[in-house]
Image (cartoon, grey):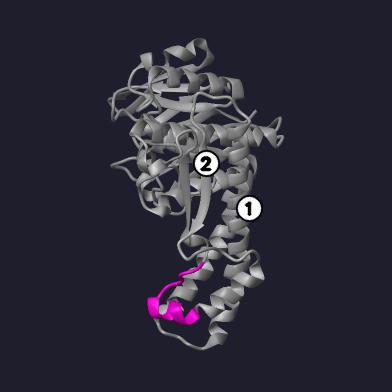
Amino acid sequence: MLALTDLTLSHFRSHLRADLHLDGRPVAIHGANGAGKTNILEAVSLFSPGRGLRRASAADMARRPEALGWKLKGQLTAARQIYEVETWSEEGKARQVRIDNKAASQIDLGQICRVVWLIPAMDRLWIEAAEGRRRFLDRIVLSFDPGHAEASLAYEKAMRERNRLLKDQVRDAGWYKVLETQMADAGHRIHAARTAAVDRLQLAQAEAETAFPTAELELIQSDGGLPDNADDLREALAEGRFRDLVAGRTLLGPHRTDLLGTFAAKGLPARDCSTGEQKALLVSLILANARALIAAGGASPILLLDEVSAHLDVSRRAALYHEIVTLGAQAWMTGTGPELFDELGAQAQMLTVHEGVDGSEVVAG
């Protein structure tokens, strides 16, 4: 089982200090809007690579008005091992990570902890721009393949350099070859990992009986498709150089991928579904992610479900809680009132968040 326990927040967002003692059960957090519930979920999201569920800068996470920095400390139980993890930022600098009192990278963190999330901003996922769907998919890919973060960083770095050359109208092929080789190698890894993740999600949905609808998924390219291997992708980048010079940016690659979803039972594109159906499809994919990881011999990722009851009726809410418990997942969920978690009963730990004199305060119950 993968679970975060004994979480401490220090000078993080609205929390001057919070000490949470957890036992691996799902965590239900309730309180008024603005009390600081989502800030706890954001803290948990930082026990995985990246900028967290809000994609905020390290400086923006610091408690105001002090803005001195912040620190998170927790105990992770993963693969029958216990890890002491700390991550922090001082005076707005890039966040640092330490695992078992040794300096570590965010990629190292990704090797031991998988976190996926669903937040209200994602309710528009199926109707917003493709970038949001790529981020959603990449977070799922990262749960299967921690090396996906490294490939993504390598691709983005090489593409930025290539785009700079294109914008400056540099035409010497020698300047492009190394960058295009780097982009092709990393880009092929990214596309292969995304394709494999989609296949795993499809299988996990098809083999499960669930109250949530199955989403048929398809990866598409705005330019018609990606080559099957790194060599062909490198050649395609070279051949498209003139077109890219005219555009001033790279027009071929995994940064142009989109994820399309269809409500399988109705044959209806997700973008045309009702708000409740769109939310149910997203929940279905999060649950499929957990099932697929377990099927591969791993543990369910930590699930962060912010205001999860929004747009879910009572029956689907109960079904969600049942599946979370059945999977053995540590899910962190928020809602405005305790009644939203009645179906969980003693199967979850309850936390109340309210505004105190010195910011957010957290109490058990």
Q: What is the spatial separation of the Cα atoms under label 1 and label 2, in whole angstroms?
A: 26 Å
Give the quarter of the image for residue 63.
top left
Comparing 329 with 107, the one in front is 329
Tell me: residue 167, above or below residue 318. below
- Measured as percent of width and height from the top left, residue 295 is found at 68, 33
How many numbered discs? 2
Quarter of the rendering occupied by the C terminus: top left
Would you name the residue on which mark 2 appears? Answer: 216
- Measured as percent of width and height from the top left, residue 261 is found at 47, 44
Q: Is residue 105 visible?
A: no
* Kind of residue sitting beneath label 1: Gly
Crowd tier of the residue under label 1, counting other residues whose Cα lies within 10 Å: few below 14, some 14–19, many 20 or above: some
> On the picture, is 64 further left or further right than 115?
left
* Kind of residue sitting beneath label 2: Glu
Lower sequence index among marks 1 and 2: 1
Is residue 27 one of those drawn in magenta? no
Quarter of the rendering occupied by the N terminus: top right
Please report the residue visible at 48 percent of the width from the left and 14 percent of the height from the top: 344
Discs 1/2, front: 2
Comparing 354 with 224, the one in front is 224
Tell me: residue 65, above or below residue 74. below
Would you name the residue on which mark 1 appears? Answer: 147
Give the magenta part as a residue range: 241-252
